[in-house]
Amino acid sequence: MMKRDLKKQTVFTFAVLCPIFLVFSFLSSNWYDGRKQDFSQYWQAGHMILAGQNVYDSAEWIAEREREGTAFHANPPFQYPLPLALLFTPLAMLPVRTAYILWVFLAQVMVLTSITMLFSFYPARSGYFEILAITGIFFFRPMFSVINSGQIIALLLLLLVLSIRLFHTHKWFWGGFALSVLSLKPSIGIPILVLAGLWLLTGKQWRGIWGMLSGGFVLVLLGALVNTRWPMDYLNISQDVFDKYYGMHPTLWGVVDKIFKIDSLSVTIGLVCVAAVLVVQAWVFRGNKSNVDAFPAFASILPAALLVAPYSWNYDQILLIVPIMFLLISISVKYGMGKAALFMVGLLALAFAMLTVAYSLGHDVWSVLNSLVVWAFSLYFVTRTDPLPDASND
């Protein structure tokens, strides 16, 4: 049988899908008003930076959104670290609709690029496996929210997968440096960095930890070019955001809130749940191959981080792409393509079932089951002794 040319297959995949992504991006701009999507607050923040305004000043934020007609759904002021606003200054030079179309297109390309990079951990894959993975992931419920609302999580996913590849090839410092950018979305980025730090600490990979710290320092300096007080301004804003959204999300905190009334007892129970997750992860890192292999390590880190995050939205579960890919590869290798397809269909069904539950209950807390199920499967396969096929370093 002729050996498949994986590089040509990758080029063909992008050549076929990118025009589809572009058409979908234009259609999305007709179906959804970019000024009313989450993207608009990133655009407005970048636009304010270009105008020399303070994104953490509520009065300036409100005045800007009145002028531009953007970010009316977002409470003032900007709710993210200042370097994120700097990142969006190039897009803020464009009209909102044009910038939205471009960002939606780039988000789809970034997700496809992330999937393709993870394919390298399975060089013996078939074309059917690629079709299963790409189709399944693009029909995973969080993808719809990521693309239509113009979320930044697709960019963070790409940087996350890049860091995994860098860790895998023993470029520990640069892997940690790339991973530090996840702090641009602290609600989910900080839990990931804490768990990744625990993994690096267990494996005594000090260069990776230094990379994370160095990347964080660079981000602080980058924001200081615009506002030297931005860390304090952001901390003041983030406390209000935490208080507002506490207990409303598909995390362990949200589950505790729905079972127990929000009080000191629920906080204590939440902390116990978080501690339990950390203990399990520490045990996995301590006693298994995951303390040296980046892909299986992050397959357990990411769902665990989504579980313990102080708050997150359903679109943050797009980060489950990493453990989903790990599980598809593991199941395909050990049990065959049929079982891998069955797992993907079951996961898609669960995600859409939780969407139905969310509409009937008026909240999306029980979508936590997506992260919990993926975490449980990941723990099972991560702790198996037989490794995955060797990844290519191309």
Image (cartoon, rainbow, N blue to C red):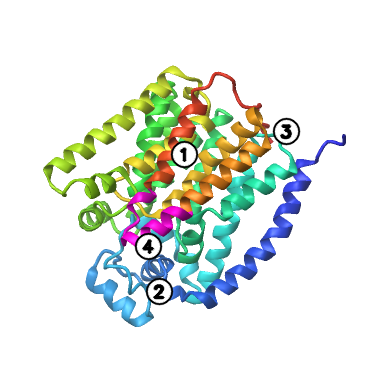
93 sits to left or right of 227: right
Could you tell me which residue is drawn at 38 percent across and 45 percent down?
189
260 sits to left or right of 209: left
Q: Given the image, on which type of amino acid does mark 1 rest?
A: Val
Q: Quadrant of the N terminus?
A: top right
123 or 69, which lies in front?
123
Identify the residue position indicated by label 2 in the image: 36
Marked residue nearer the N-terminal end (4 or 1): 4
92 or 15, which lies in front?
15
On the image, the x and y values in percent for residue 266 come to 17, 43
Marked residue nearer the N-terminal end (1 or 3): 3
Disc 3, disc 4: CB below 8 Å? no
Q: Nearer the viewer, mark 4 or mark 1?
A: 4
Q: Given the image, on which type of amino acid does mark 3 rest?
A: Ala
Marked residue nearer the N-terminal end (2 or 1): 2
Identify the residue position indicated by label 4 in the image: 359
Task: Confirm whether the magenta stretch covers residue 355.
Answer: yes
Q: Secondary structure at mark 2?
A: helix
Residue 89, visible in the rendered structure: yes
Marked residue nearer the N-terminal end (4 or 2): 2
Q: Given the image, on which type of amino acid does mark 4 rest?
A: Tyr
Could you tell me which residue is drawn at 76 percent across and 53 percent down?
12
Q: Given the image, on which type of amino acid does mark 2 rest?
A: Lys
Could you tell me which residue is drawn at 50 percent across and 36 percent down?
175
Residue 171, visible in the rendered structure: no
Numbered circle sitting on residue 374 = 1
Identify the residue position indicated by label 3 in the image: 124
Marked residue nearer the N-terminal end (2 or 3): 2
On the image, the x and y values in percent for residue 300 come to 45, 33
Q: Nearer the viewer, mark 4 or mark 2?
A: 4
